[in-house]
């Protein structure tokens, strides 16, 4: 008889997660009118660690079965990454799965991810830099995902891009926005559907990673507008 555990058994015996190693229990709540809203966990103090390199690689290691538009899904990841990298000198580079990416984005259901099994309301989570599982972002595949957050038939869907922008913020080292800065913030504990960073989001990521040169240039503003347009047009991307 072997005492070697298989992988799934090992997963079930992982040590309980320390609360400060990951953030975001985006609770999925459905209001009476059928519209879902997203409620984030309470904010914490600023996380003091970050990625200490010029380049951080990433990959969508497992996509969602809900989204048929694979190109759109990859683009969603790319746009969410670029939303942050536009502000800071850190290069965020897409690599293949077998290149050992620093940040991995994975859709997993409650059978594959015990955290979702224990927290069925959780939409997604991310581990902070400087922790053993840094760069791990998981989205709950038991929820219904889309590229625009609109209804699919009678079902409200969750916007993959918005969730990713928020989770990537955590993966880069940001905690939730303080209440007085939460209006319009993608790191807000209150979902407001915004797809661009607030001034406070930008101030915080710049304080951590420094400012990207040319942030006041016309090129920066044009690129930012283009990024937002592309996010809005994701659904119809072919
Ligand atoms: Zn969060």
Image (cartoon, grey):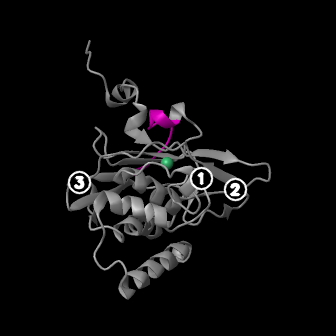
Q: Mark 3 or mark 1: name the one nearer the start of the chain.
A: 3
* Circles 2, 1 touching at the beta carbon (< 8 Å): yes
Q: Nearer the viewer, residue 55 or 43?
A: 43
Say which element carries label 1.
loop
Q: Nearer the viewer, residue 26 or 65?
A: 26
| Quadrant hosting residue 220 | bottom left
Q: Is residue 113 magenta?
A: yes
List x then y, in percent, for residue 226: 45, 81
Q: In the rendering, which numbered label is found on residue 202? A: none
Q: Mark 2 or mark 3: name the one nearer the start of the chain.
A: 3
Q: Which residue is mark 2?
A: 155
CA separation, marks 2 and 1? 8 Å
Q: Is residue 60 magenta?
A: no
Say which element carries label 2.
strand
Region rendered in magenta: 106-116
CA separation, marks 2 and 3? 35 Å
Instruction: Mark yes or no: residue 238 visible.
Output: no
Q: Which residue is mark 3?
A: 98
């Amino acid at each position: 008889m072997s005492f070697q555990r298989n992988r799934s058994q090992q997963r079930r015996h992982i040590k309980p997660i320390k609360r400060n190693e990951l953030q975001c229990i985006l609770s999925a709540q459905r209001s009476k009118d059928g519209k879902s809203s997203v409620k984030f966990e309470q904010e914490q103090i600023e996380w003091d660690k970050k990625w200490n390199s010029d380049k951080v690689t990433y990959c969508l290691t497992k996509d969602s079965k809900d989204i048929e538009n694979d190109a759109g899904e990859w683009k969603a990841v790319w746009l969410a990454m670029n939303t942050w990298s536009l502000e800071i000198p850190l290069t965020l580079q897409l690599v293949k799965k077998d290149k050992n990416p620093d940040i991995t984005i994975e859709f997993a259901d409650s059978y594959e991810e015990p955290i979702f099994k224990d927290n069925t309301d959780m939409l997604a989570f991310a581990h902070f830099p400087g922790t053993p599982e840094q760069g791990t972002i998981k989205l709950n595949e038991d929820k219904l995902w889309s590229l625009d957050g609109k209804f699919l038939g009678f079902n409200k869907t969750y916007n993959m891009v918005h969730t990713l922008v928020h989770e990537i913020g955590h993966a880069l080292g940001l905690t939730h926005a303080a209440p007085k800065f939460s209006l319009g913030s993608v790191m807000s504990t209150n979902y407001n559907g915004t797809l661009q960073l607030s001034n406070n989001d930008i101030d915080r990521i710049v304080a951590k990673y420094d400012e990207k040169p040319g942030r006041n240039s016309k090129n920066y503003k044009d690129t930012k507008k283009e990024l937002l347009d592309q996010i809005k047009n994701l659904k119809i991307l072919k």
